[in-house]
Amino acid sequence: MDDETTKIKAIGSEVKVNSWINLEVKIVELWNAKSDKIAQTGLFGDDTGTVRFTSWKVSNLPEFEKDKCYIVKNAVVNSWNGKLQLNLNRKTEIQETDADIEVSVKEPEVFKGEIIGLTNRTAAILKCPKCSRPVTKNFCNVHKDITPKKDLRLGLRIKVDEDVKVVEFRGREAQRISGFTAEAAHSYEPDDFLPDLERKLVGKTLEFTCTESKGYFYGKNARVLL
Ligand SMILES: [Zn+2]
């Protein structure tokens, strides 16, 4: 294949699933891998946008460092849960560069809508203090033995224009919307919690931004409007 590089914006339009491409990117984010088959996962960025990548352990590629720039040759466009991402495999070549790439990050869209219901994911939960994954006991799949922290998770059905969005809020966001601290949520009678919260929240107007991961929406910057 030739040395022509592709801009991230072209992925999904000019460049389709299963294409092999070369890119010049900056490492915008590195995330904790959810599987032990994954060496690294995160976000590539260039001046046209960002795209998620996965580097597999079996491919034995050099490690990326956050905020450094690389030429990545032979990455494969792949579709995961309806979203396009890049797979790095044994044929992928990675070369660090001195270039500094200005990454284009889209401003998050602000949504505004009425809360029309709560989902049964609404609950007082426990989370890992290191990675915030929900846990059931003193054990995180990634961080092993931990002392969990109390948290509150809200699953809200929000009517935004003609659309109903199901958005999850946690931590401070959930507390700000519900008026409950994590502690208070945990000491509430569990059977009364959802119906009482529903009475309190349904009909209120919420302003928020959200990020999508694997088909779920996670809300941020929540503001209950009067
Ligand atoms: Zn953890």
Image (tube, helix red, strand yellow):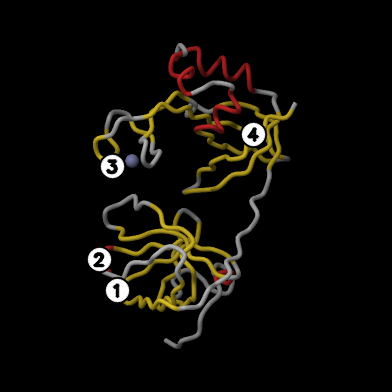
SS type, badge 3: loop
Ligand 1 quadrant in view = top left
Q: Position of residue 169 (x, y in %)?
A: 54, 34
Whole-number angstrom distance, CA of label 2 to CA of label 1:
8 Å
Q: Is mark 3 within 8 Å of ligand 1?
A: yes
Q: Identify residue for label 3.
A: 143
Whole-number angstrom distance, CA of label 1 to CA of label 4:
44 Å
- Residue 58 is tagged as 2
Residue at (34%, 33%) from the top-left corner? 135
Q: Amino acid at mark 1?
A: Arg
Residue in front for this viewpoint, 50 or 64:
64
N-terminal label among 3 and 1: 1
Q: Nearer the viewer, mark 3 or mark 1?
A: 3
N-terminal label among 1 and 4: 1
Could you tell whether 207 is left or right of 82 in the image? right
Tell me if residue 86 comes above or below residue 2 in the rendering: above
